[in-house]
Image (cartoon, helix red, strand yellow):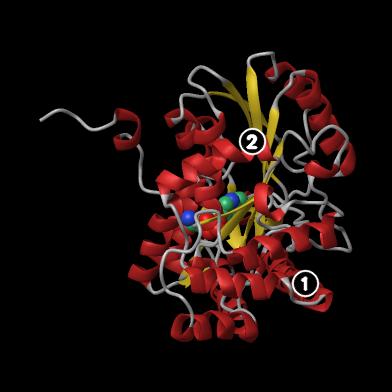
Amino acid sequence: MKSANSLMSGLGTTVFEVMSGLARQHQSVNLGQGFPDDKGPEEVRRAAADYLMDGHNQYPPMMGIPELRQAVAEHAKRFQGLDVDWQSEVLVTSGATEALADCLFGLIEPGDEVVLIEPLYDSYLPIVRRAGGIPKLVRLEPPSWSLPRRELAEAFSDRTKLILFNTPMNPCSKVFDREELEFIAGLCRKHDAYAVCDEVYEHIIFDGARHLSIMTLPGMRERTARIGSAGKSFSVTGWKVGYVTAPPEMMKAIAKTHQFMTFTTPPNLQWGTATGLRLGDDYYATLASDMQRKRDRLADALADIGFGVLPSSGTYFVTTDFRPLGFNGTDEDFCRHITVEAGVTAVPVSAFYNDTEKAPRHFARFCFCKHDETLDAAIVRLRQHFTR
Ligand code: PMP
Ligand code: GLN
């Protein structure tokens, strides 16, 4: 037998699947993979349910149902002040994961350089490479995770096709500030590069900060694809509804990829997502404030137990240093250890690096988008385990 594609068959199973499997096996409190306990807004789920029963359950238009594309454009105006043409500039995808793949396969030519920022979400590198891109990795260093400007500038060249980055950022919970985004934008303009920005946590942002899309900065409107996800904005991660906003020329190639990747996304879930994007500002404010309260509940308790807790400015996650607890193994050892011995699961942060061996090995990421009872159960277990 001829062998399958070497790059794809050489990949391991994603850390989220591995850790959730381990959590099920040991019946631990799963604060690993990021998914909310909350069911999501009633009206969003009701809209999808009603549409399933009464609506048109056949192929929707390839770009997405008009109601959702219009809602994505309205939402971009409301929160980012962007004027978006829903017909030529919005595409609905099966999750942000597909949106990312559509952008990368649609924009990268084999041999193009692609700038990426570590730590990074685990789907980025395999898709960049499969698209023939040559990754140029720049690392953020804990605990500040601030942008290393010189290294970033050096990673760009006239061979750079695009930069792919994520804000608010999983796993390190960093939010890029205006100056950092302006610096990235300057490099994109200088080297005539695209920006693909994963903004799935745009509404999960804390301490009064507002999400800023790089697409709003001078010269970036015509070179940015920004990606959102219903999963995160409406606490329905299983839905896998994503949306891309990009200028028409970029969108043509992205949409061509989508048409042969999935072609369409379930129409009832699109309908529900349109309902969500039109919820009032109070919905979004409450989403962020509820999540911030959960962050504080978990982060304060972990600090009290003895973890070194890093700041979390957005996302579902908090990064912790477990060395103060006296644990000397790797982050993988630690996450396995607490799953088996304490009954709580976290995710090793080294999984978000190209080379795990050369990554920081002393951080575990905990997810706080859970009911208070779930967080409290995890806290009790960890406290018992580490104060024994
Ligand atoms: N990007 C980041 C940074 C994420 O954390 C996630 C989480 N799942 C995704 C993309 C994928 O989103 P979706 O579930 O909509 O595919
Ligand atoms: N984005 C989620 C996380 O970081 C998981 C997504 C997945 O399981 N693929 O935990």
Residue ID at (83%, 58%)? 77
Q: Residue at 67%, 65% (x, y): give it.
A: 302
Q: Report the amino acid beneath label 2.
A: Met
Residue 291 percent location from the top left of the image = 72, 71
Instruction: Answer above or below: position of 297 versus 101.
Output: below
Q: Is residue 224 visible?
A: yes
Amino acid marked by disc 1? Tyr
The one of 286 and 359 positioned closer to us in this rendering: 286
**Pointer 1 or 2: first along the chain:** 2
Q: Nearer the viewer, mark 1 or mark 2?
A: 2
The total number of labels drawn is: 2
Quarter of the rendering containing residue 135: top right
Place of residue 55 in the rendered image (x, y in percent of width and height, measured from the top left): 49, 80
Position in image of residue 319 (x %, y %): 66, 54
The residue that label 1 is drawn on is: 284
The numbered mark at residue 58 is: none
Q: Secondary structure at mark 1?
A: helix
Q: Position of residue 140 (x, y in %)?
A: 70, 35
The quadrant of the picture occupied by the N terminus is top left
- Residue 250 marker: 2
